[in-house]
Image (spheres, grey):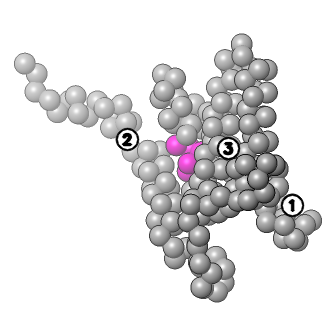
């Protein structure tokens, strides 16, 4: 996924806030967007230090077992603090969303270390050059655009439409 992680993190924050009955505050939105892209921080290491000798999805930031341990530790450490728990929950859910999105057209080692085999729902054939055209011209990119469009629409639609007040105003009173 090229562009879906940031909007998916935004959508995760909005959905969690809605489910909790709280407003999607800037810190929740930031936590969701940060979690949505955080696993790709390993790209810096892959480019600057490792020089792509290993696929970046093999680093710890893309290993579900690592995030399972981090999530379990977060549940144990932040049981009582709502102020810390909500942004952390949003961050971690967005990270899990990142891994799920990467599983659509990218390799994720879901069963590592027990099984050293990646999982991907779709294999994108390498038929175009440069390599990134293969992803942009594949149908999965339409899914990514969908995430981006929904996030932009939710962020920019008028507040009265968001709250449902427009529908209430247009209904005749009895």
Of 84 and 118, nearer the camera is: 118
Mark 2 crowdedness (10 Å alpha carbons): few <14, some 14-19, many ≥20: few
Position of 114 relative to 159 (above/below)? below
Q: Is residue 30 visible?
A: no
Gap in angstroms between the C-alphas marked 2 and 3? 29 Å
Q: Residue furthest right?
A: 49
Residue 7 magenta: yes
Quarter assignment of residue 120: bottom right
Residue wearing tag 2:
158
Image quadrant where one finds the N terminus: bottom right
Quarter assignment of residue 124: bottom right
At 47% from the left and 60% from the top, the residue drawn is: 143
Gap in angstroms between the C-alphas marked 3 and 1? 18 Å
Position of 53 relative to 63 (above/below)? below
Magenta residues?
A: 6-11
Per the image, label 3 sits on a secondary structure element best described as: helix
Q: Is residue 52 visible?
A: yes
The tag on residue 95 is 3
The tag on residue 45 is 1
Q: Earlier in the sequence, mark 1 or mark 2?
A: 1
Position of 133 relative to 172 (above/below)? below
At 59% from the left and 70% from the top, the residue drawn is: 123
Q: Which callout, 2 or 3, points to the residue nearer the camera?
A: 3
At 59% from the left and 78% from the top, the residue drawn is: 125
Residue 98 magenta: no
Of 169 and 49, nearer the camera is: 49
Mark 1 crowdedness (10 Å alpha carbons): few <14, some 14-19, many ≥20: some
């Amino acid at each position: 996924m090229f562009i879906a992680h940031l909007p998916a993190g935004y959508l995760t924050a909005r959905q969690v806030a809605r489910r909790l009955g709280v407003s999607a505050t800037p810190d929740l939105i930031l936590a969701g967007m940060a979690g949505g892209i955080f696993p790709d921080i390993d790209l810096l290491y892959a480019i600057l230090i490792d020089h792509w000798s290993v696929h970046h999805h093999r680093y710890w930031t893309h290993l579900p077992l690592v995030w399972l341990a981090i999530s379990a530790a977060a549940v144990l450490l932040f049981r009582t603090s709502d102020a810390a728990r909500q942004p952390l929950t949003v961050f971690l859910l967005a990270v899990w969303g990142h891994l799920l999105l990467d599983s659509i057209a990218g390799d994720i080692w879901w069963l590592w270390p027990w099984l050293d085999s990646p999982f991907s729902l779709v294999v994108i054939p390498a038929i175009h050059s440069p390599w990134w055209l293969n992803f942009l011209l594949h149908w999965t990119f339409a899914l990514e655009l969908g995430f981006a469009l929904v996030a932009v629409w939710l962020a920019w639609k008028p507040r009265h439409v968001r709250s449902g007040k427009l529908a209430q105003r247009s209904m005749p009173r009895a």
